[in-house]
Image (cartoon, rainbow, N blue to C red):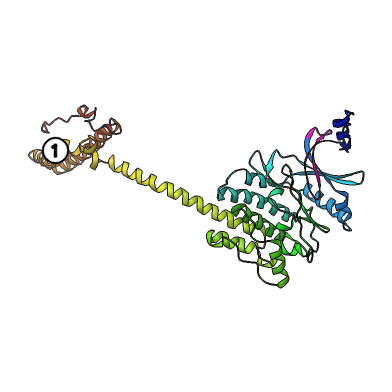
Amino acid sequence: MSRRIAWRLFGEPSETVKIGRFRVGETLGQGGMGVVYAADDEQLDRRVALKVIRPEVVARAPGEHGRLVREARALARLSHPNVVQVFEVGEHAGVVFIVMELVPGTTMAHWLAGAPRQSEDILRRFVEAAHGLAAAHRAGIVHRDFKPANALVGEDGRVRIVDFGLARGERLADRTVTTASESEDSASSATATTGSLAGTPAYMSPEQLVGAACDARSDQFSFCVALYEALHGSRPFTVEAILACAQAGGRAPVLPHAKHMPRWLCRLLTRGLALRAEDRYPAMTRLIAEIEGALGRRRRARMFALGVPAMIAAAVAGHQLSPASAEFIGCPAPEAALVGVWDDAGRAAVATAIATTAAPFAPTVRDRVVEALDVYAGVWARARHDACQSSVTPGDQSRPRLEGGFAVSRGRATLS
């Protein structure tokens, strides 16, 4: 940085900054844990994100260096569509750095602030984030600092979680909570710092705030705080309120807007924001199933709402195209054309003509002839109706063009 300032002020040449085999480029963002740079991997010829951990973070607690390295290596073995891929972890001049996938896009926080969002769109984005958290939990990794600024929405629309395992809970009781301002162009927003605590207290679970052990259910609490904020524009509780309830051994305060949200969502958030970890969902997968089930019900209801008018329209159209309504669109009932040609009188005439032969097989011939002529008359009537309907365009009330194309001879059937 000093070389860049000297180059801008005095024109002195700026040497390329390298960390290991990575050529460091522009700063993408910075926070309480470290600084994220865009960098070029000269060996593999690819663009990456390089996070350099601040030395004071590593030095603040015994074993912190080893923990960071172990969890970064565990993340490097984790491959999931909703988790930013960690390529490797290393050290340079006593500083720990993590090499990650560079995702073009923006943070979830900026995505939410960029335009008004439908609640269903917000829920779908958060479900993707929840899948990323669940994958990390299965690998034994707890995020400890989930918030909208630590989820990226890529240009491909996919959500990816970043900054796993970098915040570690330490006792916060009896301390003044101060929140560091977030950089507007930060790729991974600044964290809040209180004493030796690194993280964002506004999203922390009660157990993390008071320095107790954190597990996957702690991430669940942070997730529900972020989801509530995304849907309602404000967080459900203040840090002071959560600490006061936790220290008093009481229950979490009642959710604001509880009367104005769907019952399933109120139930989900109430459980996910329980003060005691054992009262929350046992795993993120259960919470995901709740949200996806509700989204599925809404989708089916929408399809039903769209399908009913379509079915009614189809039924009306079918009725309009049925033989009973044929005359309405200009097609007379085909049976009318058979009157006097093949009807009860025609059947009686055929039967009489066959009977006058006095042949022993006359009854059998009579039945077969009448049946054959009935079948032929039915086929003719259906063909006439179909041809008539195909010649009528919507709104055409005139006599069909093919009306004159079908005629029936009205001659009397005789047998020689």
Q: Nearer the viewer, residue 69 or 235?
A: 235
Amino acid type at mark 1 = Val
In the depicted view, which residue is nearer to us: 130 or 115?
115
Q: Main secondary structure of the magenta part?
A: strand
Position above or below: 229 against 356: below
Please give the name of the residue rendered at 37% of the width and 46% of the height, measured from the top-left corner.
311
Q: What is the x, y in percent for residue 350?
A: 12, 38
Q: Which residues are magenta?
A: 25-46
Q: Which residue is mark 1?
A: 339
Coordinates of residue 329 in the picture (x, y in percent): 24, 36
Figure quadrant of residue 225: bottom right
The image position of residue 56, as x and y in percent, is 88, 52
SS label for mark 1 = loop
Is residue 388 inside the magenta stretch?
no
Q: Quadrant of the N terminus?
A: top right
Task: Determine whether, in the image, residue 17 is placed left or right of residue 190.
Answer: right
Left or right side of 244 for 338: left
Q: Position of residue 186 (x, y in %)?
A: 74, 43
In the figure, 251 relative to 283: above or below?
below
Seen in the picture, residue 323 relative to 275 is either above or below; the reply is above
Residue located at (81% from left, 52% from top): 71
Residue at the farthest front position? 9
Q: How many marks?
A: 1
Instruction: Give the left or right position of residue 380, taking residue 9 as reference.
Output: left
Label 1 neighbour load within 10 Å: few <14, some 14-19, many 20+? few
Magenta span contains residue 26: yes
User: Of all residues shown, which one is farthest toward the left?
Assistant: 356
Q: Quadrant of the C terminus?
A: top left
Camera-side residue of 49 and 365 = 49
Q: Is residue 316 left or right of residue 126?
A: left
Q: Residue at x 28, y 30 (%)?
A: 391
